[in-house]
Image (cartoon, rainbow, N blue to C red):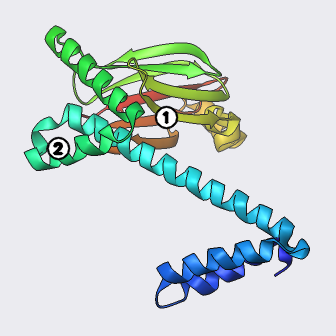
Amino acid sequence: MDNELYFFRILQEALQNPEPGLALSQAFDRIERLGVQEAYRGGLENFQRFMAEVRSCRNLMRTNYARELIVALVTNASEFSTEQRQTALAFLASNPEWRSEYEQLLGQFGERSSQGLSPAIQVYRDGNRVGEMTFDDPGVSRSLGQITPGLYLLKLSTGLVLWEGQLAGRDLLWVEAFGAQKLELAAETEQVQRQPTGEISLLGGEVILRIFAGIECGDLEIEWIA
């Protein structure tokens, strides 16, 4: 392995050690010492970028967990014991953004419960709002049509982000998703069978997002299970 990726070999050796925690600490020191040498400077920069990505992924995982926990606390409060609830709230309180999202969602649910309403999910494409879906009863599905390729964002009206992702032609256009032959067969029966090109579980399974392809554009279907 060349010097540009020298740190991989060092990390691998540390992970194979009977005491990986101590070995990794020593491995980081070794990587830093080697990185001072001219021959390894490019590799040290790669290592630093690698570690930055690791920290970013870890933070993202923690944020996703926090958002699932927020919804669970608000929508299924009775399922938590007093101790579990206190522990969860202490975890959320460690981050001002998470605490704010929890308080906003709690306030929205309280207001909507008094009015007999459920939360609303807003849909954005490339930064522009293209629709909103409300759910009056559990288990109800709502659909939004005229979905064209772009960067999509789904969030509650409180601002809590549920999902963000790029949807391309292979997700939304029948020919790209299933091929022209299947389209011709569907046309012979005068209907296009609804077959999702993607299904994404959100908020720990509380919400299901399904993506459907169409002739010229696609549809988004959202099922609020809780």
- Callout 2: helix, strand or loop? helix
Quadrant position of the C terminus in the picture: top left
Q: Is residue 70 left or right of residue 190?
A: left
Q: Is residue 205 visible?
A: no
Tell me if residue 19 comes above or below residue 69 in the rendering. below
Asked whether 47 or 76 is in front, the reply is: 47
- Residue 55: image location, x then y, percent: 57, 55
Q: CA distance from mark 1 to mark 2?
A: 27 Å
Mark linked to residue 116: none
Tell me if residue 60 comes above or below residue 4 in the rendering. above
In the picture of the structure, the residue carrying the numbered disc 1 is: 163
Residue under the point 63% across and 74% down: 28
Q: Is residue 44 visible?
A: yes
Q: Residue furthest right?
A: 38
- Residue 197: image location, x then y, percent: 55, 41
- Residue 32: image location, x then y, percent: 72, 72
Bin the neighbour count of mark 2 within 10 Å (Cα to Cα): few under 14, some 14-19, many 20 and up: few
Quadrant position of the N terminus in the picture: bottom right
The mark lying in front, picked from 1 and 2, is 2
- Callout 1: helix, strand or loop? strand
Residue under the point 39% across and 33% down: 96
Asked whether 118 or 93 is in front, the reply is: 93
In the picture of the structure, the residue carrying the numbered disc 2 is: 86
Tell me if residue 46 comes above or below residue 53 in the rendering. below
Tell me if residue 129 comes above or below residue 56 in the rendering. above
Instruction: Identify which amino acid the numbered label 2 is placed on.
Output: Gln
- Residue 134: image location, x then y, percent: 34, 16
